[in-house]
Image (cartoon, rainbow, N blue to C red):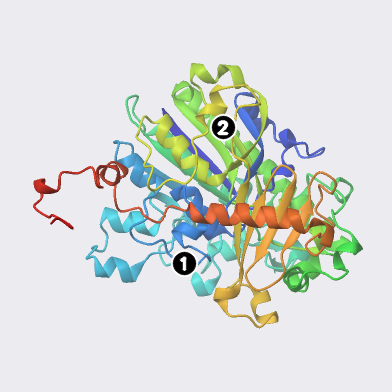
Amino acid sequence: MNILFIMCDQLRADYLSCYGHPYIRTPNIDALAAQGVRFNHAYCQDPLCGPSRASFYTGRYVSSHGVMANEDPLRIGELTLGDHLRNIGMPATVIGKSEGTFNEVSAQRFGITSGSDQQKYLRHNGFAPYEILEGLYPDPVLPSDLGYNKYLQSHGLDAENPWESWANSAINEQGKIVSGWQMRNAHLAARVPEEHSETAFTTNRAIEYLDNLQADDRWCLHLSYIKPHWPYLAPAPYHQLYGAEEVLPAVRSNEEKENAHPVFQAFMAEDYSQNFSRDEVRETVIPTYMGLIEQLDHHIGRVLEKLEQKGLRDSTMIVLTSDHGDYLGDHWLGEKDLYHDPSIRIPLIISDPSTPADTTRGLMQDHLVESIDLVPTFVESAGGPLSVRHLEGRSLLPLLHESNPTLPWREFAISEIDFGSRGPRQRLEMHPYDCRAWIIRTPTWKYVLHQKFRPQLFNLADDPDEIIDLGIDPSLSHIREQLHEQLFGWQRTLKVRTETAMDELMARGPQRNEEDFGILIGHW
């Protein structure tokens, strides 16, 4: 089974038609959901790009792999999806965003040479790079070899930094060139023509990759789009497909501001949250966010059509997901960062072409699943062994091949937060090591354990929008204690002993014949 692993950046689960949005048009993604399983309660392990993707790519929780911020590199010994697949002869390639931070100190320590395959894997979270487009290229961080800029220049879109001047710029009503960094310009069309936009370019490179495949090739392609992540700027006609009348009301209440938790309060005070709390901002930005999603749907349709043309559809597992969500003004917040569902709940659609999956096509699955479940799912579907000592996720193949909704599964999902590199750390005058929180989500409750502050609690049965914080309600102390113990139990089972194979561990112990290795302990 080959693998097409599609990830969108900062795409909320409820901003797809097949997940219930009443206005967004996503016919190609909807068709993919009809051919597979749509997971209704899928959660990322962290609402920041870097830590979330590290979990997606290792099959391990944030507390295990140690990537707490976007700039953190993976430990050099962490195995990734690419490592697991290469071990069984399947190359893993990325087109688009890899969010990898190179662990230069460790690479030098272990003598990994510049330009080697191993160095490339370490730079890109275990994938071999085919075309990298991370999506954020202001002048201070512009790489000299950015392929997308060279592509734009080759099509006459010249500038010192074509990404900034074309993809992230627009022309306002006065004919002046303005920047996509200012959200007030989100209603304008990006200067770049749609056929040369980031989403189109990324798709073109994916189609080129597929065109070069041979019939008997084994492959995993991680097609990783930057959009609908900010800057919120869409090329024509996608900038004007939706209007303010199609912006859903913000999920928020003034009650949330009363005696607000200190961390929540600090994030509400950030500029992006203050801005997204204004209707003017939401009515300007969200229609463009929706347009970017419809553009993604169009280009994903092109990729699916190419699979059909190449005769690859029946041998390819297709996954569509997102690394995290976007508050868009819900709960008086912008960006992601915290524990509400708009931030940590993600879309997850899996289309498995195998015959055992025929019974589940078109189903919505309500089991709690996590982003770390994808690595074991991919490895098992490709016929590889699951590394028990490394992987903390569970293969989803039983849920893809079994339509029984009572199939025993996970009792809770876990996400983690670290805001040590975010603005609220300074507002709260905290050390980076203290800026952590752990979230346990059961079918009924969501409990947030903060490193330095009181816990939070939400009753999802009575308050599905997570408005009322019950973290200090004395009548629910027993619930908080129960969830705290569940969280502590989870932490005790994290897989930190990764360097010794399970078979070797089982073979050790008192049942061994001590005379075989000549060490006799405690004999008289």
Any part of residue 446 in sight: yes
Q: 27 and 367: which one is in front?
A: 367
Neighbours of disc 2 within 10 Å: few (<14), some (14-19), many (20+): many
Q: Amino acid at mark 1?
A: Asp
Task: Give the mark nearer the N terminus: 2 vs 1.
Answer: 1
In which quadrant will I find the C terminus? bottom left
Element on which disc 1 rests: loop
Find residue 72 and name its label: 1
Neighbours of disc 1 within 10 Å: few (<14), some (14-19), many (20+): some
Q: 152 and 57: which one is in front?
A: 57
Image coordinates of residue 453 in percent, x first then y, are 69, 72
Element on which disc 2 rests: strand
**Horizontal side of residue 511 vs 328, given as left or right:** left
Which residue lies at the image location 19% right of the left edge and 44% below the top edge?
512
Which residue lies at the image location 72% right of the left edge and 69% below the top edge?
454
Image coordinates of residue 505 in percent, x first then y, are 29, 46
Q: Residue furthest front?
A: 524
**Relative height, residue 504 to residue 365 (above, below):** below
Image coordinates of residue 7 in percent, x first then y, are 55, 45
**Relative height, residue 96 to residue 31 (above, below):** below
Which residue lies at the image location 35% right of the left edge and 35% below the top edge?
385
Q: Amino acid at mark 2?
A: Ile
- Marks 2/1 in contact by CB < 8 Å: the verdict is no
**Horizontal side of residue 182 vs 131, given as left or right:** right
Any part of residue 326 in sight: no
Find residue 350 and name its label: 2
Image coordinates of residue 8 in percent, x first then y, are 59, 47
